[in-house]
Image: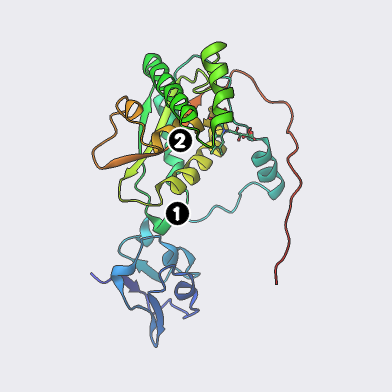
Amino acid sequence: MDLLTVDHNKCIKCGLCVEACPSCILNMGTDGPECNFDRGCMSCGHCVAICPVGALDNKYTPLAEQLPVPTNLPSQEDIYNWMRARRSIRLFKKETPKEADVVKLLDICRYAPTAGNSQGMYYLVLTDPNKIKAIADAVADWMELEVAAGSNNKRYFTVVLKAYRERKQDIIARNAPMLIFATVRRLNVTGVSNAEQCFAYADLFAPTIGLGTTIAGFIQSCAIAGYQPLLDLLNVPDKHKVVGTLMVGYPKAKYQRMPERQHLKYEYID
Ligand SMILES: Cc1cc2nc3c(=O)[nH]c(=O)nc-3n(C[C@H](O)[C@H](O)[C@H](O)COP(=O)(O)O)c2cc1C
């Protein structure tokens, strides 16, 4: 089966599919769009999604599986406020998030952008409090080694270690009832950037299902650095590597206000 099927009765040869193709593998022939290198298709579905008359099909992203974009989306003001009201959640109820909610949280991450539409994220979900404590302990051990080695994070890690070791405050895992590790195949060089995008989706979506999330930066840095005692706790599948970590739980409190940020800084460069 060819990559593209064009309904020539419908096609108006507007060329939008050709212009939108991220791989530039389409061109406009006399009868409509044609593919000049079908192995270059990254299965993003844009050519089908953008066609104003539904004339185009792609064997990897069938027209029949593409939902129409809803017309009743929230207003710009609602979305602006939603995004501003998002908070990193560090106060969690003890309750383990329900699997149905976790599935919804991770499912929306499938729609985040990934380099070359590589997707391929595989999540490890941890809920055992003893395992989470062991993970935080391993991260603290790693930080001590980093401090001793004179790492660039020496001063910051020293502050973190004081809280974790001396004051017994869980600054590393925030007593979260759940940690989610994003993993990708080892050869995927854009995995960390992809995971950031996926978890940004999770952060923004979580409140719609009553969840709160925060990037577990210390834990993910330790895992990405390849600290073996931490990796030994995770059972990462063979050929996979950790590219991100998220704390997840039901928030214990509700934020009432939206803090201000640094001023926007920008300039046009000619
Ligand atoms: C890469 C990254 C790592 C982060 N790591 C942590 C972390 O380990 N612990 C934590 O409590 N918050 C962490 N955060 C959350 C930031 O502290 C938070 O985004 C920032 O303070 C602004 O607050 P807000 O997200 O509620 O707007 C991280 C955020 C990012 C983007």
> Quick one: 172 or 196, which is closer to the camera?
172
Residue 52 picture location, percent across and down: 50, 69
The answer to whether the beta carbon of the residue marked 1 is less than 8 Å from any atom of ligand 1 is no
Whether residue 230 appears in this view of the structure is yes
**Residue 20 in picture, x, y percent from top left:** 48, 70
Q: Is 62 located above or below residue 123 in the figure?
A: below
Name the quadrant of the C terminus. Answer: bottom right
Residue hosting label 2: 221
User: Could you say whether the residue bearing mark 1 is in a helix, strand or loop?
Assistant: loop
Q: Position of residue 178 (x, y in %)?
A: 44, 23
Q: Residue at x 63, y 35 (%)?
A: 86
Lateral position of residue 76 relative to residue 127, left or right: right
Location of residue 34 by image quarter: bottom left
Say which of 186 and 157 sits in front. Answer: 157
For label 1, the residue is 67
Amino acid under disc 2: Ser
- Whichever of callouts 2 and 1 sits on the residue coming sooner in the sequence is 1
Q: Is residue 138 left or right of residue 15?
A: left
The answer to whether residue 66 of the structure is visible from this angle is no
Asked if residue 147 lies left or right of residue 58, the reply is: right
- Check disc 1 and give the amino acid type: Leu
